[in-house]
Image (cartoon, helix red, strand yellow):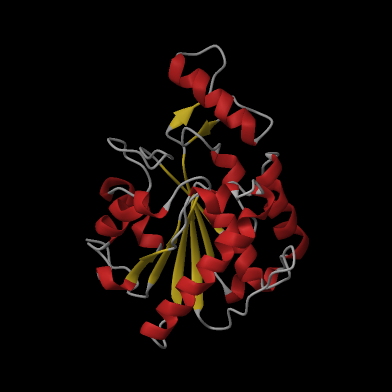
Amino acid sequence: MASVRQNPVVIIPGVLFWDSLYEVMRDALAEWVPKEKIAIVPVNLVDWVGFPPSPERSTNRVMASLHRTVRDMARRFPGEPVTIVGHSGGGTIAMVYLLQQPFQGDVYRVDGMVGRLVTLGTPYHTHERFAKIKTDFIFSHIVPDFFRRYPVVSVVSDQYRGALGGNVTEKLCYMFYRSVADDGDVAGDGIVPAKSCFLDGAENVTISETEHLPTPHTRWYGTKEGIERWIEWL
């Protein structure tokens, strides 16, 4: 079994996913970190979509829940900086949060509560409308010193190749990848192209045999098999 940091962990779900989907991830991660030191940011579909619909404000709603969860874990485990694990678009929300700059009017003081960020299948380079609100903000505010304060590890799988003229799976991957980046004829995790997750200043890690979607009967980032691929970077 890999030796890993025993700091508290806060898991932030991906866009349009809700907290209960990540219970399997918390249970699996508890093989390495005590379960009481692992929390999932409480989010639901309304947080992402809004009521009335306001998806452009989803980052603000989820960031507020993230801050409450981080603050609670910091209170419960004083002196142990939290590791945030962000899945998919949850990773860019964590980045916005850690930048500690006003985002659509909201900013939070993190201070020493957080020690590092691990993102799983998080696209930092995308042309998707609502994701780009976050990534444009990140690239307009990030500076090299950020990574000295908050080391970032960006993990992505290259399990599936996209190909417009390929089989059904390859065609689907091609379409998903094209919704994120300009080229669909690349490798990725089935939803996000791997190269879109590479971030200058971060430690970029490519793994294999891992899928993006947190669905039953798949080997996604949050299953025991998936976690084994990236646990050494936690």
For the point 54% across and 54% down, which residue is it?
47
- Left or right of 31 in this view: 139: right
> Is residue 186 placed above or below 22 in the rendered structure?
above
Residue 74 lies in what quarter of the image? bottom left
Q: Is residue 14 at least partly visible in the picture? A: yes
Residue ranking furthest to the right:
140
Q: Position of residue 4 (x, y in %)?
A: 32, 68
**Which quarter of the rendered picture does the N terminus lie within?**
bottom left
Q: Position of residue 52 (x, y in %)?
A: 64, 48
Q: Position of residue 107 (x, y in %)?
A: 68, 73
- Left or right of 152 in this view: 159: left
Residue ranking furthest to the bottom:
79
Residue 9 lies in what quarter of the image? bottom left
For the point 50% across and 73% down, which residue is it?
68
Q: Is residue 94 at least partly visible in the picture? A: no
> Is residue 151 placed above or below 231 in the rendered structure?
below
- Which one is nearer the viewer's eye here, 124 or 66? 66
> Is residue 24 placed above or below 185 in the rendered structure?
below
